[in-house]
Amino acid sequence: MTALTRILYVEDAPDIQVIAKLALESIGGYEVLMCSSGAAALAQAPAFKPQLLVLDVMMPNMSGPETLLALRELPNFSTQPAVFVTAKTQPDALAHYRQVGAVEVIEKPFDPLKLAAQLQEVFNRYASH
């Protein structure tokens, strides 16, 4: 099984960026590319070659679902599992996230101490298919 080492995290809130990056790097040992917008993710992701995509849903200009659809148009971005992080977890919203391609949804506020393990579990489940 492939080891998870590189995570692309797209989040517009600076405080959540700091917490998530710290949690994923220090607890999970992952290399994290933190982007504060969908446009930044589209520009930086190809060189970074992430194995897992983590996206905030509600962002200005380009939402998480819009960002994911745009990433899927790039070469070599059709297979990475995608996780949305959001406070909007009503059943219709969850159905929409899955329709767009999310394999998991993590509810905000998330537990920083558990985030690395949650993402590893998602990656393991997806990588075993």
Image (spheres, rainbow, N blue to C red):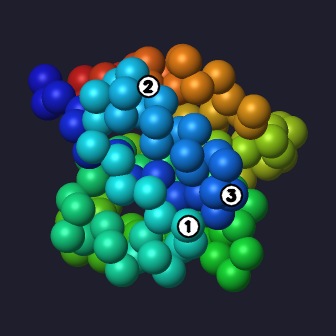
Amino acid carrying mark 3 in the image: Ala
Label 1 sits on what residue type?
Ser
| Left or right side of 75 for 27 | right
Give residue 120's quadrant in the image: top left
How far apart are the two marked residues, 2 and 1, measured between alpha carbons?
Answer: 20 Å
**Label 3, label 2: how many angstroms apart (C-alpha)?**
19 Å
**Residue 45 visible in the snapshot:** yes
Relative to 27, say whether 32 is above or below: below
Residue 74, x across and y down, in percent: 31, 76
Q: What residue type is labelled 2?
A: Ala
Q: How crowded is mark 3: few (under 14 residues within 10 Å), some or many (20 or more)?
A: few
State the residue at coordinates (71%, 67%): 59
Secondary structure under badge 3?
loop
Q: Which residue is drawn at 64% across and 22% down?
A: 111
Above-or-below relation of 22 to 43? above
Is the residue 85 above or below the residue 57 in the image?
above
Label 1 sits on residue: 36
Q: In which quarter of the image is the C terminus?
A: top left
First along the sequence among labels 3 and 1: 3
Q: Quadrant of residue 116?
A: top left
Residue 126 shows in this picture: no
Q: Position of residue 123 (x, y in %)?
A: 35, 30
Sequence order check: which comes first, mark 2 or mark 1? 1
Residue 116 marker: 2
Left or right for 1, reference 128: left
Residue with the mark numbered 3: 13
